[in-house]
């Protein structure tokens, strides 16, 4: 009987370990930007995922009507941008991508206004604010297991993660959103480690 319990406990530990590996390593390694998606910048230019130059990228999904976590995360990213600019890597080796998950309501004008509120005046500053068709937006979000839905009131319910991508567009690390979960220093260190 003792051997049976030990066998069951060992099997349980192996299954838990396999599950942890799947969700923290294997699944994350499969997350990447789809090559066949073209989105539009807030300034009306096409942005082809298959034509991106090799750079470290921080990917954020948001929508402009979000009352709290989205603008707070974007604000934290402005602090991170300042640190990366001081290190002379922002724009050259590191780029931010912010994709709206509400392309129906987030028109280019609305997305441009949102970008300007965070100090981004054009698409040449190393921070892309993008919108796409609903199908392409879902395709990109699905590639990262980023879930979102509209319960009918325009206040989208969504995953609260940002994604650090390597030069090939694959996820290196995931970070939370909002002031309490997006830690500027932690993300900065992860980016600088990847650049070395």
Image (spheres, rainbow, N blue to C red):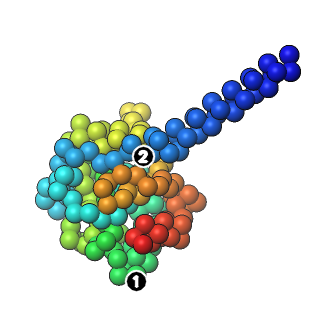
**x, y percent for residue 73:** 45, 60
Residue located 41% across and 58% down the image: 164
Residue 29 is marked as: 2
| Rendered residue at 23%/36% (across/down) | 135
Q: Nearer the viewer, residue 28 or 150?
A: 28
Q: Residue placed farthest to the left in the image?
A: 45
Image position, residue 154 (x, y; %): 37, 41
Residue 84, image x, y percentages: 40, 76
Residue at (40, 52) in percent of width and height:
171
Task: State the image coordinates of residue 9 (x, y, percent, origin top left).
Answer: 75, 27
User: Within 10 angstroms of label 2, few (less than 14), some, or many (20 or more) residues?
Assistant: some
Q: Is residue 51 left or right of residue 126?
A: left
Q: In the image shown, does 51 or 18 lie closer to the viewer? A: 18
Q: Quadrant location of the N terminus? A: top right
Residue at the extreme front: 3
Up-down relation of residue 103 to residue 59 (above or below): above
Query: Residue 134: which numbered mark, if any?
Result: none
- Viewer-closest of 162 and 103: 162
User: Disc 1 to disc 2, how far (Cα)?
Assistant: 30 Å
Comparing labels 1 and 2, the label whose residue is closer to the camera: 2
As drawn, which residue projects farthest toward the right? 2
* Mark closest to the chain's N terminus, 1 or 2: 2
- Under circle 2, the secondary element is helix
Residue of label 1: 86
């Amino acid at each position: 009987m003792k051997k049976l319990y030990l066998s069951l406990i060992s099997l349980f530990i192996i299954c838990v370990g396999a599950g942890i590996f799947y969700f923290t390593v294997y699944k994350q390694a499969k997350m990447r930007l789809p090559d066949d998606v073209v989105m539009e910048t807030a300034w009306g230019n096409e942005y082809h995922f298959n034509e991106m130059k090799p750079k470290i990228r921080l990917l954020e999904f948001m929508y402009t009507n979000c009352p709290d976590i989205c603008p707070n995360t974007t604000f934290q990213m402005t602090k991170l941008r300042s640190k990366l600019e001081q290190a002379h890597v922002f724009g050259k080796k590191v780029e931010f991508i912010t994709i709206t998950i509400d392309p129906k309501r987030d028109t280019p004008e609305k997305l441009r206004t949102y970008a300007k509120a965070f100090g981004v005046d054009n698409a040449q500053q190393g921070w892309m604010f993008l919108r796409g068709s609903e199908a392409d937006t879902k395709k990109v979000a699905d590639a990262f297991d980023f879930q979102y839905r509209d319960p009918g009131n325009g206040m989208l319910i969504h995953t609260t993660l940002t994604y650090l991508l390597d030069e090939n567009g694959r996820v290196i690390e995931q970070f939370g959103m909002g002031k309490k979960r997006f830690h500027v220093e932690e993300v900065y260190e992860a980016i600088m480690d990847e650049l070395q």
